[in-house]
Amino acid sequence: MPTHFSNEMIEAAINGFENQKERIDTQIAELRAMLTGGSTSVASRGPGRPTGGAKRKFSPEALQRMREAQQRRWAKARGEAAPAANKSAKPKAKRRLSPAGRKAIIDALKKRWAAKRAAEKA
């Protein structure tokens, strides 16, 4: 085990441990809020965002997908049948290549191969 650490290594270790501490503090606050039925807004700020700065936003569809996935995970953990997926969500349409796009790709490949063959002959 090395006995001499550079300042950058020590600072990186400190930053890593501070990030872990923030995550743990947030999780503890959320669990305490579950016990008391209170809010976690104060605890979720942490030292990185002292005034509750920018927070990642998710679209309603993404939130719904995450919610359903979590419900399926918990149902699986409890040994229950997973709840049915949201039937109102339309499946994404399969993308198709247009004939013009296909022709453009073929023409570009032919041009590339012709250039390669010409380069090999030269």
Image (cartoon, grey):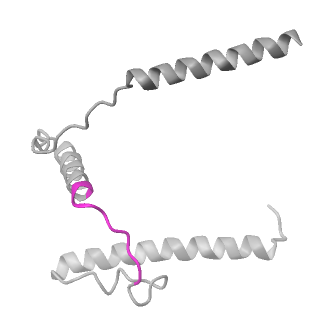
Name which quarter of the figure residue 54 lies in. bottom left
- Quarter of the image with the N terminus is bottom right
Q: Position of residue 40 (x, y in %)?
A: 27, 81
Q: What's the magenta bit mostly, secondary-structure-wise? A: loop
In the image: residue 46, left or right of residue 74: right
**x, y (%) of residue 107?**
57, 19
For image coordinates 62% across by 15% down, the residue present is: 110
Of all residues, the one furthest to the right in this rendering is 122
Within the magenta stretch, is there residue 55? yes
Work out whether residue 86 or residue 37 is closer to the camera in this orientation and state it. 86
Please identify the residue farthest to the top as the structure is shown.
Answer: 121
Q: Of 69 and 113, which appears nearest the observer?
A: 113
In the depicted view, which residue is nearer to us: 69 or 1? 69
Give the residues drawn in magenta, as a range: 53-62
Percent position of residue 52, x then y:
38, 85
Q: Tell me if residue 107 is in the magenta stretch.
A: no
Residue 69 in the image: above or below residue 101:
below
> In the rendering, at what x and y percent does residue 29 appear?
32, 79
Q: Residue at x 21, y 37 (%)?
A: 91
Compared to residue 98, the image places residue 30 above or below, namely below
Quadrant in the picture for residue 83 = top left
Residue at 24% x, 59% y is 63
Residue 115 shown left or right of residue 54 in the figure: right
Q: Residue at x 19, y 45 (%)?
A: 72
Establish if 85 lies above or below 54. above
